[in-house]
Image (cartoon, helix red, strand yellow):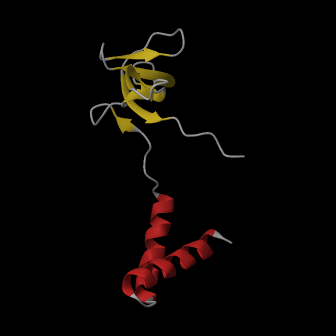
């Protein structure tokens, strides 16, 4: 099934579900919105001024929640060196930590590392 066929099928399903019957004008609007979203996908980068990565949590063998001082590893943009690098945010020291041996400059944006593909 092509992308356009998927858009038509899903658009018809949603319009019928919410409005009780097919509507060609609403379907055209849905198609336009889907094409626009394809052309202008959401930027995955998050400003460090907007928010920081959450603390990593886990549970011990008794089921007790453990809250760590650092976030999960994320991909950060280092504006000082104009490169991306693997980092985590330490909430106790309020500093970014590098996962390599290099000095960190100013991390201005970050994004979660996507999950690996399911094979």
Residue nearer the viewer, 54 or 109? 54
Q: How many marks?
A: 0
Q: Position of residue 70 (x, y in %)?
A: 39, 20
Point out residue 26 in the picture as x, y percentages from the top left corner.
41, 83
For this view, does 42 lie left or right of residue 49?
right
Image point 45% across, 89% down: which residue?
Answer: 24
Residue 54 drawn above or below residue 102: below
- Residue that appears at 43% across and 89% down: 23
Of all residues shown, which one is farthest toward the front?
A: 62
Q: Is residue 8 above or below residue 42?
A: below
Quarter of the image where one finds residue 68: top left
Going 30% across and 17% down the picture, which residue do you hit?
94
For residue 79, which quarter of the picture?
A: top left
Vertical placement of 103 versus 76: above or below? above
Residue 119 image position (x, y, % from top left): 72, 46
Report the front residue among 74 and 107. Answer: 74
Residue 62 percent location from the top left of the image: 45, 25
In the picture, the quarter occupied by the N terminus is bottom right
Furthest residue toward left: 49
In front of the other: 67 or 42:
67
Is residue 92 toward the left or the right of residue 66 in the image?
left
């Amino acid at each position: 099934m092509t992308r356009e066929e998927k858009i038509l099928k899903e658009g018809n399903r949603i319009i019928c579900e919410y409005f009780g019957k097919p509507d060609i004008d609403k379907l055209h609007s849905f198609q336009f919105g889907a094409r626009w979203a394809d052309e202008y996908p959401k930027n995955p980068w998050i400003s460090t001024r907007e928010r920081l990565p959450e603390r990593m949590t886990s549970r011990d063998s008794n089921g007790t929640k453990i809250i760590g001082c650092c976030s999960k590893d994320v991909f950060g943009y280092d504006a000082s060196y104009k490169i991306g690098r693997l980092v985590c945010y330490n909430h106790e020291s309020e500093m970014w930590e590098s996962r390599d041996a290099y000095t960190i400059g100013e991390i201005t944006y970050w994004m979660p590392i996507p999950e690996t593909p399911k094979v």
